[in-house]
Amino acid sequence: MLFDPNQTEFSSEYQRIIWQFGTHIVPPEVSLADVEDEETREGCMQIFNCTMEILTDMYHHPDEYTERPRWYTGDYLAWLTTSSKPMKKHSEEYLRYMRKIPQFGFEYDENLGAWSNERYPLFFEYFPRLVALAKERKQNLGGYLDRRDFRLFAKRITLTLDDLLRSLSNTERAFALELHEYALEKGMKEEKGTYSFRYVYKKLYSLELHNHPFGVLVPYRLDNGKHIPGQLERFIAVAESQPDADELVKYIQGGIRVCNACNGIKKANERCQLWVEIRGARRLSSACHPTISKYRRGSKNLAYTDEDIQMLKRMIDVRITQVDKFIADLQ
């Protein structure tokens, strides 16, 4: 099975990126379950089959591609089907892709000055419609075009826990379920997104579960929209008061999310970082993403263990107490 979520070995990092993208494609039996019109269903199936043909070629011939998969399966196809001019920085790669794309059934008619596809004859009608719907219906954090989620053509989109779990490995799925159930037991309410679920405790985000890739984040922010002075200190103070304080503080030292200048985009003087000290350990904490997580560490070793999950459950306990104390102090 290609794009098996349990796969662990790849020929290159780029092949792994292609694989991860492929694992997020929603199966037609799910995305078309509530789409009734037969022609629409057929048009969607042609988009799905063409997409999988492209991704399969990318996976087996990664050296022939340079950009992220979403460009070859999304923007480049959108420009082609609407005869739009590509972005300047993508113009050379787009032209190279146009020379390759006939292997997926696309043909250019010199006389008409237009593209067509006999293998997927409905593609040029339904792909632009899918792109337009994805722009119109951005609820649940978007992501529907990349995932080929044809629920866009249905009257309403109802995401379920399966949408979070589907692209995860068996181990990750078990971890996500454990944390999901723990959060609900603690009185949190879930907010569903295509690539993450957020859990709210007393109107404050208190847990995030991600699937692109799998990641667990426990926020310590005391206002969903801005920094509150002393919020980390309050979080650490709760951890220090616990019987297992040493273990908790050590995990916070290693797991606090640090500022990475928005993935290197911003200059040093433009960062939103805050220097903090945690039992003598200085950390350049992220002010825009104040969370505790294994995911932030910058290492490729992001595989979660059972020990991580148990410690993150304790982080949830600390978070709940932090929020309760903060609200009590305001009253």
Image (tube, grey):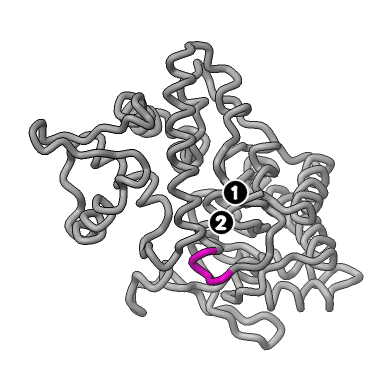
Please provide percent x and percent y for residue 51.
45, 41
Q: Magenta includes 12? A: yes
Q: Nearer the viewer, residue 245 or 259?
A: 259
Please provide percent x and percent y for residue 261.
41, 72
Residue 130 seen in the figure: yes
Please provide percent x and percent y for residue 271.
39, 72
Q: How many marks?
A: 2
The CA span between labels 1 and 2 is 6 Å
Tag 1–tag 2 contact (CB < 8 Å): yes
Q: Vertically, is 260 above or below 312? A: below
Q: What residue did someone put label 2 on?
A: 19
**Figure quadrant of residue 28:** top right
Residue 208 seen in the figure: no
Q: Residues within 10 Å of mark 2 (few under 14, many from 20)?
A: many
Specify the label residue 57 is tagged with. Answer: none
Q: Magenta includes 149? A: no
Find numbered disc 1 in the image and state the secondary structure of the residue it sits on.
Answer: helix
**Figure quadrant of residue 257:** bottom right
Left or right: 204 as drawn, with respect to 58: right
* Quadrant including the C terminus: top right
Q: What residue did someone put label 1 on?
A: 23
Find numbered disc 2 in the image and state the secondary structure of the residue it sits on.
Answer: helix
Q: Which residues are magenta?
A: 11-15
Q: Vertically, is 234 above or below 139? A: below
Give, as a three-letter code, the residue at label 2: Trp
Q: Residue at x 86, y 68 (%)?
A: 242
